[in-house]
């Protein structure tokens, strides 16, 4: 029986010959100590709760780039739930820009869009 959630079709390794993208120290500029800790701590999950305009999106996108770039996770192994489709698009665009390539298979979206995706698979 085929596993509908198999990650083999979600491999997002860099193109052949391209080096893996790791965090540039500049990616951490402007993060406060708590934000920096959320990015570089990779043992377990992270729940980021903060008010509007406090850098949540930057923290999460930087963390995703760190996890993917260091090979600690593939995009299909990351789940991020947002409140709006606009926020999800913004995060995907930022991650792709930071990685320097399109990102495929990331489980990033609203509760409803992720649920539909799971049901369709």
Image (cartoon, grey):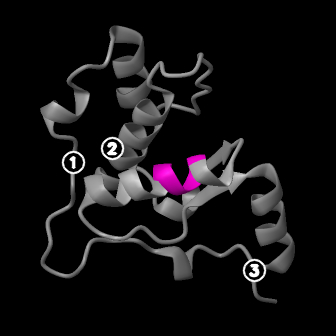
The residue under label 1 is 22
The residue under label 2 is 66
Q: Is residue 97 above or below residue 39?
A: below
| Marks 1 and 2, the one that precedes in the sequence | 1
Marks 1/2 in contact by CB < 8 Å: the verdict is yes
Q: Nearer the viewer, residue 57 or 67?
A: 57
Say what secondary structure mark 2 lies in. Answer: helix
Residue 89 shown in magenta:
yes
Occupied quadrant, residue 68: bottom left
Disc 2 crowd rating (10 Å Cα; few below 14, some 14-19, many 20+) is many
Disc 1 crowd rating (10 Å Cα; few below 14, some 14-19, many 20+) is some
| Marks 3 and 1, the one that precedes in the sequence | 3
Residue 3 - label:
3
Q: Horizontal and vertical percent for residue 94? A: 37, 51
**What's drawn in magenta, residue-wise?**
87-91
Disc 3 crowd rating (10 Å Cα; few below 14, some 14-19, many 20+) is few
Residue 34 - label:
none
């Amino acid at each position: 029986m085929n596993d509908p959630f198999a990650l083999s079709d979600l491999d997002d390794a860099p193109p052949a010959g391209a080096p893996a993208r790791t965090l540039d120290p500049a990616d951490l500029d402007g993060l406060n100590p708590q934000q920096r800790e959320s990015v570089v701590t990779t043992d377990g999950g992270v729940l980021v709760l903060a008010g509007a305009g406090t850098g949540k999106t930057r923290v999460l996108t930087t963390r995703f780039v760190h996890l993917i770039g260091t090979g600690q996770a593939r995009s299909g192994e990351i789940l991020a739930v947002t409140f709006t489709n606009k926020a999800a698009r913004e995060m995907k665009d930022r991650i792709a820009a930071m990685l320097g390539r399109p990102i495929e298979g990331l489980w990033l979206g609203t509760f409803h869009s992720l649920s539909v995706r799971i049901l369709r698979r």
